[in-house]
Image (spheres, rainbow, N blue to C red):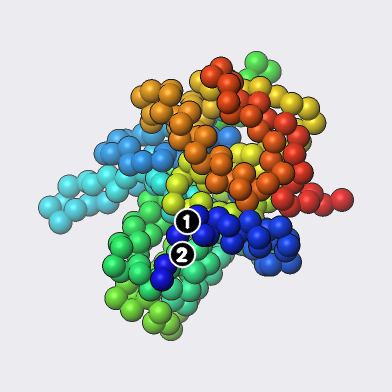
Amino acid sequence: MAETQIQKIIRTADEVAFTSAKEADQLGFMSKCFIQATLPHSDPGDVPLWGRKNGNYSLTIQPHYVFDKNGKPKNIGVPYGSLPRLILAWVNAEVVKTKSSELVLGKSLSDFMEKIGLDSATGGKNGSITRLKSQAMKLFSAKMSLTYDGPEKLAISNTVLADYAEYFWDPIHPEQQSLWHSRVVLSAKFFEILSAAPVPLDWRVLKAVKRSPMALDLYMWLSYRMYYLDKPQKIRWEALAQQFGSEYERLIDFKRKMRTHYKKINAIWQSLNVNLDSDDSVEIRPSRLLIKPKS
């Protein structure tokens, strides 16, 4: 019988309480660039450019184009949802571990799916294999611009994520091993971005809340903020909505979703001290970290 999300949350809370991410070999990472301004939660559609702004920082994404069977350029779309977030977390963790820009995804599709918390046994039935291949293509072929436009500094970084990528994956038999490894060669600039002080994460938490891109974003953001938070800080709901959920037309809907996802994360990360009860702002308070910083 498949494990329910509530059962998964409870099991993950027990695992996290008794075994560190490093001891469990479940240490992940994410660049703060994709925490300060996140990917879209849902499909933005056939758009030539998509972006997110958070204060002085902004992220813009240009999707890749291919020619269709009629010889017309086709927009393959912007990466969105949980899958590109999980892929990025895995890529960032591999960069930290291997110190290499060439990453081996695995000799089989099921091998890679297991690494990012997906079940290859049901992948064909629920369409996750098709979505994974589609989102991986959108992510690794996209062009991104990261911009910081502050009162005393302007910084712009334009990059493609990968210089080269190849997959030898059989969607019909995901466990089938290929003679060649599937791999991605990251661009020099993207490798530099991922190597610059990434935020440590616990893969067990990512896998427990993987159904929701907002829950993933919230866990990553809290992990990032708690690392340097030394006193309580209030953040207006409007600012959080701009950073996390600009797709929501009504602020009340964003608040409801955020509170629901926080309860899941707090059930695992029980030392979190965040107050979301106010209608005006969210107060985050210094909390014990799930992953201890290096001395």
Residue 126: x and y in percent read: 30, 63
Residue 40: x and y in percent read: 42, 39
Determine crowd level at label 1: few under 14, some 14-19, many 20+ residues with C-alpha closer than 10 A. some
Residue at the limit of the structure toward the left, as seen here: 70
In front: 271, or 23? 271
Task: Classify residue 80 as left or right of residue 146.
Answer: left
Q: Quadrant of residue 272?
A: top right
Q: Work out whether 276 lies above or below 85.
A: above
Task: Classify residue 189 as left or right of residue 287.
Answer: left
Image quarter of the N terminus: bottom left
Determine crowd level at label 2: few under 14, some 14-19, many 20+ residues with C-alpha closer than 10 A. few
Amino acid type, callout 1: Gln
Residue at figure coordinates x 69%, y 36% from the top left:
273
Q: Quadrant of residue 23?
A: bottom right
Residue at figure coordinates x 64%, y 39% from the top left:
222
Report if residue 157 is visible in the image: no
Task: Classify residue 264 as left or right of residue 178.
Answer: right
Residue 160: x and y in percent read: 48, 47
Q: Secondary structure at mark 1?
A: helix
Q: Work out whether 72 lies above or below 121.
A: above
Residue 267: x and y in percent read: 61, 48
Q: Which residue is mark 2?
A: 3
Numbered badge on residue 30 = none
- Distance from disc 2 to disc 1, alpha carbons, whole Å, reads 7 Å
In front: 214, or 187? 214
In front: 224, or 63? 224
Q: Work out whether 217 lies above or below 238.
A: below
Q: Which residue is mark 1?
A: 5
Residue at figure coordinates x 76%, y 44% from the top left:
288
